Image (cartoon, rainbow, N blue to C red):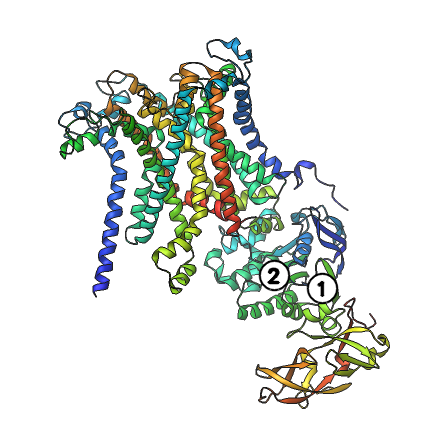
């Protein structure tokens, strides 16, 4: 049980730097998710915490110890790998007990802790099987079991659900969440799937190109993205991002359409500034089909092109000026292609980003 | 109906054709084996005797020094030499090959491709060309006509190929296995012996068998670096027969059978692994 | 509390070199140093019977002598022709056999095992076996031909200039075809179904499918086979040494048998080493060529590091 802290952590392969000085403090028992597109350095960061990659610069500490030069086995962490990395020549029981055996625990203690983990994860019936005889979900569970038997200071997960089919993924996600509640430990979890990040995390760390873009609770990251990258990466369907220019208290889009500058951001922009206007599809809804929620509104009449019925809601494809945007219709009805609808724009939930820096104009 | 019949006929024809081809492939070898079980007189008989009239194990008894007539060629000593030399050099080559193969499979380092190519190219030096300087150096070091001399040469002969094969086998084991073991508390050394080695075991065994066969069958170097019963191996010994005035075809065939039998058994054991290892390391890199 | 940095031999950076050290040392002492020594020797007039001649520097005279020697060029040319014919035949026959076996579903395992048969024979045994088969007096071939009434005399398989060369090529091809067959068969097994079916749907006939889909896919396997074969082409020395010893009267003399004759029988080590160098360069060039081809094919297949 320990907090983990990264100070100016850098990873270089030869001359290429892939992680550029990361600072991050993870609290005791916190569930932190590193999320980002592939190649953003999230796995490398995790592997540096695990000790599977050297740290080129900076320091990582787990609890009170700086672990930079400690091999993985001395860091008292456990890890669940993307492909589970179960030992194919051992039974489930042997897989679970392997770490304890290496640590020279007594057979009685090993049996007790293996059974305990098996109990938590419901592996009882599978104990004498080999990994080859298990389904994907079962392997996943064994991998988690192997991680918890050792009572480590932290769990590291490296894209553990990416090899499962969609349904199983949702199920295992819940199990991981439950597991964290049962076995209180610090968790660092790496994924490229923002839904996983949103559902699992206490705090999300959004990464890109070896930098941390934003750290925050799922709500913070969703509601207050610091830049266009985070805005487009978190949330599905992604936030609409429209190039625009500030003119006379109006956000004017290419093609001439305009919207008032949201009041809360009015003093953060200047006339003539090039901005990117960000609006989630949930906040662009036909009148009468939005989420009942007070706040600043504006109206736009737009022609709907395609629509995709999802059940409780419909995604509407339309254009503001010459920009393709998506809106949502809650409590849907049939919409014909080409139909013109009046949309509510939830200005209080809209975002403005400086086009040059990509950063939110909001006071940070 | 006509179409399926024609297809079936074609299939049968194909099979027959292949089978006949295979038989032609095997006849020369089988003829030698057959000869090993018949007296020399029958081999020399005119008109030829096709099917052995009185097959016996006399030839084997003869070359191993049992029975009434014996040959002057000390086959048991050659056999022992072959076994000792091949086994020892195999074990050493395997240890070296495992260490090297692991390095190539698991690490990135400078000169990796160059080193690999260099090791492989060392294997291309024709045995007879290599034998000349080794002959001169070994005779100064007193390694001519010594088992040790051949063992050293065979280790070097086997190391490149052993590395190639073992590299391939280790690559088939995900790197995550060893990482998981290290996170589970193993040192890299423990992770290797407890996880990676057991998983690569059968592949390594087949690399070993391949090394054994190379040593067991080698002739070009052995024929020039050995002199007497102290170190002569079976392939060199086989040539003893031709030095006599009349070739003892039957005895020679019996000796050939003795050479081929271990090779036969061992090749059967590893054929699957061998092909997998060669193609995997070659294609998937 | 930071643990101290581990000593250098435990650091990741040096581990691969340490692991490779035994292999490198072995090759250094048993292959590289002797080769350097033999390179030196090839510039001396070293004869085995006169040890002091090891220090007798003769410059390029050995090379001048062998390059001006008709016997050497004949053996060299014969070796090149021998390799060209043998390797092409092995490849074509191996490809044919692999395709044939790949087609066959019933009894495939048996056929595969039979196909492996020649691989188990050491070259020396192959040589002996064909010395026996081609023997003009008691060989099974002549006996069979006579029994079938196809020939009435003893055909001098290992004596006649053309027949003897045919015989050694036959033995070599017999021994090594299965290497090609097996590796190409492995390639055929590994071949994905989709492109084949796509090509058929696209209207390719059997030949076009083979030419445009199967063959390109097999190329890396062909290069693997060629590389493996190039590692041991010189094993043909064993075969020829047993079958004909390079004779009669040098009619089947290959570079390798010539080296052995000059070095050991005539004890002219310096000159033999010069020839050995020619054979080494030949082998290395051969291997290197196919190895680079293999690497290129690997990259092409997207499997490289």
Q: Secondary structure at mark 1?
A: strand
- Which mark sits nearer the N-terminus, 1 or 2? 2
- The residue to which callout 1 is attached is A205
Above/below status of C164 relative to A57: above
Q: Residue A159, which numbered label?
A: 2
Q: Is residue B141 left or right of residue B263?
A: right
Q: Give the left or right position of residue B19, taking residue B194 as reference.
A: left
Quarter of the rendering occupied by the C terminus of chain A: bottom right
Q: Secondary structure at mark 2?
A: loop
* Any part of residue C289 in sight: yes
Q: Quadrant of residue A29?
A: bottom right
- The chain ID associated with circle 2 is A
Q: Is residue C160 left or right of residue C223?
A: left
Label count reads 2
Residue C90 image position (x, y, % from top left):
36, 40
Q: Position of residue B281 (x, y in %)?
A: 49, 45
Residue C82 image point, x, y percent: 37, 32
Give A164 or A135, whichever is nearer the viewer: A164
Residue contact at pointers 1 and 2, CB within 8 angstroms: no
Q: Nearer the viewer, residue C275 or A8?
A: C275
Q: Residues within 10 Å of mark 2 (few under 14, many from 20)?
A: many
Rounded to the nearest whole Å, what is the CA distance between mark 1 and mark 2? 14 Å
Q: Give the quarter of the figure containing the N terminus of chain A.
A: bottom right
| Mark 1 nearby-residue class (10 Å; few <14, some 14–19, many ≥20) | many
Q: Which chain does the residue under circle 1 lie in?
A: A
Residue A180 picture location, percent across and down: 65, 65
Residue under the point 75% across and 65% down: A214
């Amino acid at each position: 049980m320990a907090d983990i802290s990264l100070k100016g952590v850098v990873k270089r392969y030869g001359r290429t730097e892939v992680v550029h000085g990361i600072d991050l403090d993870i609290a005791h028992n916190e569930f932190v998710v590193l999320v980002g597109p592939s190649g953003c350095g999230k796995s490398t960061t995790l592997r540096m915490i695990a000790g599977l990659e050297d740290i080129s610069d900076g320091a990582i500490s787990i609890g009170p110890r700086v672990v930079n030069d400690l091999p993985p086995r001395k860091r008292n962490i456990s890890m669940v790998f993307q492909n589970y990395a179960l030992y194919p020549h051992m039974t489930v029981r042997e897989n679970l007990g392997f770490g304890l055996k290496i640590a020279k625990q007594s057979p009685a203690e090993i049996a007790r802790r293996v059974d305990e983990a098996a109990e938590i994860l419901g592996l009882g019936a599978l104990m004498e099987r080999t990994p080859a005889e298990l389904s994907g979900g079962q392997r996943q569970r064994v991998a988690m079991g192997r991680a918890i038997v050792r009572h480590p200071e932290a769990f590291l997960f490296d894209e553990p659900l990416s090899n499962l089919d969609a349904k199983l993924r949702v199920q295992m996600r819940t199990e991981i969440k439950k597991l964290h509640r049962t076995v209180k430990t610090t968790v660092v979890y790496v994924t490229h799937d923002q839904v996983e990040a949103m559902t699992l995390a206490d705090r999300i760390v959004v990464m890109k190109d070896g930098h941390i873009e934003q750290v925050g609770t799922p709500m913070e990251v969703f509601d207050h993205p610091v830049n266009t990258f985070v805005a487009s990466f978190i949330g599905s369907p992604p936030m609409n991002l429209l190039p625009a220019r500030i003119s006379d208290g109006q956000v004017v889009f290419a093609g001439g359409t305009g919207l008032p500058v949201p009041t809360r951001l009015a003093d953060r922009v200047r006339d003539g500034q090039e901005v990117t206007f960000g609006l989630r599809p949930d906040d662009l809804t036909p009148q009468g089909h939005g989420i009942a929620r007070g706040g600043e509104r504006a109206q736009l009449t737009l022609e709907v092109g395609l629509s995709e019925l999802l059940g409780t809601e419909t995604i509407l494809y339309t254009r503001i000026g010459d920009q393709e945007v998506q809106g949502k219709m809650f409590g849907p009805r049939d919409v014909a292609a080409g139909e013109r609808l009046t949309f509510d724009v939830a200005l209080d939930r809209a975002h403005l980003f400086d086009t040059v820096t990509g950063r939110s104009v909001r006071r940070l | 109906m006509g179409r399926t019949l024609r297809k079936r006929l074609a299939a049968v024809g194909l099979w027959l054709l292949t089978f006949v081809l295979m038989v032609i492939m095997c006849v020369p070898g089988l003829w030698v084996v057959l000869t090993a079980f018949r007296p020399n007189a029958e081999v020399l008989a005119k008109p030829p005797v096709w099917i052995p009239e009185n097959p016996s194990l006399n030839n084997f008894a003869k070359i191993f020094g049992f029975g009434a007539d014996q040959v002057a060629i000390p086959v048991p000593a050659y056999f022992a030499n072959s076994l000792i030399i091949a086994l020892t050099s195999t074990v050493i080559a395997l240890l070296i090959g495992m260490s090297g193969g692991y390095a190539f499979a698991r690490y990135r380092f400078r000169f990796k491709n160059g080193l690999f190519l260099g090791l492989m190219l060392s294997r291309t030096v024709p045995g007879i060309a290599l034998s000349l300087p080794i002959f001169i150096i070994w005779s100064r070091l007193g390694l001519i006509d010594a088992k040790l001399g051949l063992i050293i040469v065979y280790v070097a002969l086997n190391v490149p190929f052993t590395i190639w094969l073992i590299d391939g086998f280790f690559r088939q084991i995900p790197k995550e296995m060893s990482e998981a073991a290290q996170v589970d508390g193993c040192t890299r050394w423990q992770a290797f012996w407890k996880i990676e080695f057991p998983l690569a075991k059968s592949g390594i065994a087949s690399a070993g068998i391949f090394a054994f066969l190379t040593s067991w069958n080698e002739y070009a170097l052995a024929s020039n670096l050995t002199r007497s019963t102290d170190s002569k191996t079976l392939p060199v010994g086989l040539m003893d027969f031709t030095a006599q005035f009349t070739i003892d075809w039957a005895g020679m065939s019996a000796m050939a059978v003795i050479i081929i039998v271990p090779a036969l058994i061992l090749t059967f054991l590893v054929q699957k692994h061998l092909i997998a290892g060669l193609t995997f390391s070659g294609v998937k890199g | 509390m930071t643990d101290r940095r581990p000593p250098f031999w435990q650091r990741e950076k040096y581990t691969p070199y340490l692991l490779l050290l035994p292999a490198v040392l072995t090759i250094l002492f048993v292959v590289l140093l002797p080769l350097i020594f033999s390179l030196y020797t090839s510039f001396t007039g070293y004869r085995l019977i006169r040890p002091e001649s090891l220090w007798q520097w003769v410059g390029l005279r050995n090379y001048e002598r062998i390059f001006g020697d008709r016997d050497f060029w004949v053996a060299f040319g014969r070796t090149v022709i021998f390799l060209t014919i043998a390797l092409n035949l092995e490849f074509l026959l191996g490809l044919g056999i692999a395709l044939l076996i790949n087609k066959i579903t019933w009894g495939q395992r048996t056929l595969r095992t039979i196909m492996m048969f020649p691989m188990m024979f050491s070259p020396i045994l192959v040589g002996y076996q064909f010395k026996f088969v081609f023997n003009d007096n008691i060989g099974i071939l002549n006996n069979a031909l006579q029994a079938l009434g196809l020939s009435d005399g003893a055909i001098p398989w290992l004596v006649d200039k053309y027949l003897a060369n045919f015989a050694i090529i036959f033995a070599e091809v017999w021994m090594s075809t299965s290497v090609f067959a097996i590796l190409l068969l492995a390639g055929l097994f590994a071949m994905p179904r989709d492109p084949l079916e796509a090509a058929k749907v696209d209207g390719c006939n059997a030949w076009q499918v083979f030419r445009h889909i199967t063959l390109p896919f097999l190329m890396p396997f062909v290069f693997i086979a060629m590389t493996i074969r190039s590692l041991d082409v010189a094993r043909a020395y064993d075969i020829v040494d047993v079958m004909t010893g390079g004779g009669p009267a040098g009619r089947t003399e290959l570079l390798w048998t010539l080296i052995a004759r000059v070095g050991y029988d005539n004890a002219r080590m310096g000159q033999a080493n010069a020839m050995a160098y020619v054979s080494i360069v030949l082998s290395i060039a051969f291997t290197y060529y196919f190895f680079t081809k293999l690497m290129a094919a690997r990259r092409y297949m997207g499997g490289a590091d």
